[in-house]
Amino acid sequence: MNNHFSSSGEVFSWLSQFINLERGQKPKSFRLDRMETLAELADCPERCAPSIHVAGSKGKGSVTSILASVLKAAGFRTARYMSPHVIDIRERICLGDSYFDEDIYITAGNELRHITETLLPAAVNSQPLTAALFDPAAKDSCEPTFWELLTLLFFLCARNGNCDMMTVETGMGGRLDSTNVLDPLVSVITLIELEHTEILGNTITAIAGEKAGIIKPGKPLVLTRQNDSSALGVFRKKAAELNSPLLYLPDIAELSGVKVTAQGTDFTLNFKNVENVESSMQPLFPAPMSLSIPVPGKIQAENAALAIAAVKTAIPQITEDDIRKGLANLNIPARFENITSSSADKNMPPVIIDGAHTPESLAHCVDTFCSLYGEGGILLFGCAADKDAAAMARTAHARFSKIIITTPGNFKISDPAQVYEAFANIAGRQKTELIKDTQEAIKRTLELADAKNNHGRHLPVLGTGSFYLVSEIRKFTAMQI
C-alpha cells in the first residue's frame, strides 16, 4: 500500500485526523517534553535556521507577518508560522507571505507521517519514558496533538525549503506551547489580556507567566506596552532572572503623527537610546522614520514599531529601506480587511473583516471602523465559548444600529445563544438578532447592509469576534462579488 502523499491537500487532510473537538484542549494536552521528543525523532528541524519567536494575547499574528515581510525585503528566505488561517490552511506555513512550493509540503508531510507512524511507535515500544509521554490512557499524557504535529510540519518545511530565517507565532501561551522548542535570536511579547483562562490561568499575572516562558537565557526580549503593571512586573522579573536584555517599547521608541485612512496607517517612529551589544548607548535607528503600513488602525502602527524593534535587534544590518519595502509589501488577511473594495459594484457597502477576539482588540477595531465609516453600521459577531462576550458587548454595542450574533465556524466550541444573551442584555433585544446558521447570518447581514438607511446610504458591515467567522464571511462574500 502506498502511504506517500501526492499533494499538500492530502498532507493537511491526514493531519486533520488529530483534531478532536469533543475532547477539546485540556491542560494535560500541553507538554513541551512530548514536542521535544517528536523534534528529536525528526533530527531537530527547529534548529535549521535562526528564529524570532512571538507570543502575546493580541497582535502577535500581525507582528509575525511584519517580521517576515521585512526579512523578505532584506533578502532572507524566511519561513513564517502563524494561525489561524482565513482561506487556505497553507497560510499557517508560508515562505514569506507566499505558499511553499507543493513539493516542500509533500516532502515534509511524508517525513511527518514516517515519524508518526514508524519512528514514534518504535520509540514508544523501546523506551518506557517515551511510552509514558504518548500513552493516551496515562494520567498526565496523551497522543501527539494536532498543534504539535502542525508545528513539526512547519519546521520540516523550513528545513526542506532551505530557509535562513524563521518568524514563529505561538499557538497558546508560551511556556508549554509546541513552538517553545526554539532557541530564538529574540523573543517578542505583545499585549497581555485575560484569555484561555481555563488553560493559562485566570489572572493577568498567571497568563503573563505563561507568555514569559518563551524568554531564553541571555537572549533579548522585545516587549510592547502593557496596560497592566503586574504583567510588566512579571516580564521584568523573568528577564532579569535569565539575564535577558529587556527592550520595553515605551522606553525605547516613540510613535507620533499617526494618521489612519481606509488605505492604511501613516506614522512617525523615533527610537531612543538603548544599550547595544557593545554596551554603548545608541538608538536602533539614528533618525525618525516616516512610515506607512497598508493596514488601517493605530494598533497596527504599534505592531509595526514592535516588529521593527525586534527585527533590528535580531539582525542589526537591517536597513531603513528594508523596513519601508517590507511594510509596503505587507499582506495580512483579516486584519481590518475590506473584502468588497475590489467589487465592480461601487454601490456595494463596505464589508470589513477583522479577527479581533479580545475586549481590547475589539475596542481598537471598532474605533477604527467608526472613524472611517461612521457609527450606526451593522455588527456581525461570533466568538468561541472561552471568550468574554459580555465585555466585548459592552465595548461595541452602542456603536452599531444592528447586531447579528452567529456561530463562528465549527473549528472551536462555541455557544452563540449565550453570546446572544450577553449582547441582548446590554444592547437590547430589538437591536440584537441571533441566527445560528453562519451562512444565513452572513446573508441576512448583507441584505440589511444593502438596504439604505434613512440618510440614504448603505450601511457598512464589521464582521469580527473570531478568525473562523471572518473566514466564513470572506468565502461567502467572494461568491457574491
Image (spheres, grey):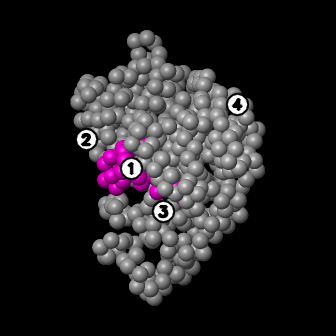
Secondary structure under tag 1 reads helix
In three-dimensional space, the C-alpha distance between marks 2 and 1, rounded to whole angstroms, equals: 25 Å
Please indicate, yes or no, whether residue 277 appears anywhere in the rendered image. yes
Secondary structure under tag 2 reads helix
In three-dimensional space, the C-alpha distance between marks 2 and 4, rounded to whole angstroms, equals: 47 Å
Going from N to C along the chain, the mark reached first, 1 or 4, is 1
Tag count: 4
Residue at the spot 49% in from the left edge and 56% down from the top edge: 241
Please indicate, yes or no, whether residue 12 appears anywhere in the rendered image. no
User: Which of labels 1 and 3 is toward the front?
Assistant: 1
Q: Is residue 292 magenta?
A: no
* Farthest bottom residue in view: 126
In three-dimensional space, the C-alpha distance between marks 4 and 3, rounded to whole angstroms, equals: 36 Å
Secondary structure under tag 4 reads strand
Mark 4 sits on what residue?
Answer: 289
Mark 1 sits on what residue?
Answer: 207
Give the label on residue 418, or none.
2
Going from N to C along the chain, the mark reached first, 3 or 2, is 3
- Estimate how packed mark 3 is, as few (under 14), some (14 to 19) or many (20 or more) residues with alpha carbons within 10 Å: many
Measuring from the top left, give residue 96's x and y in whole percent.
66, 51
- Amino acid residing under circle 1: Ile
Give the residues in magenta.
192-216
Q: Are marks 1 and 3 in contact (CB under 8 Å)?
A: no
Going from N to C along the chain, the mark reached first, 1 or 3, is 3
Mark 3 sits on what residue?
Answer: 178
- Estimate how packed mark 4 is, as few (under 14), some (14 to 19) or many (20 or more) residues with alpha carbons within 10 Å: some
Task: Name the image quarter holding residue 81.
Answer: bottom right
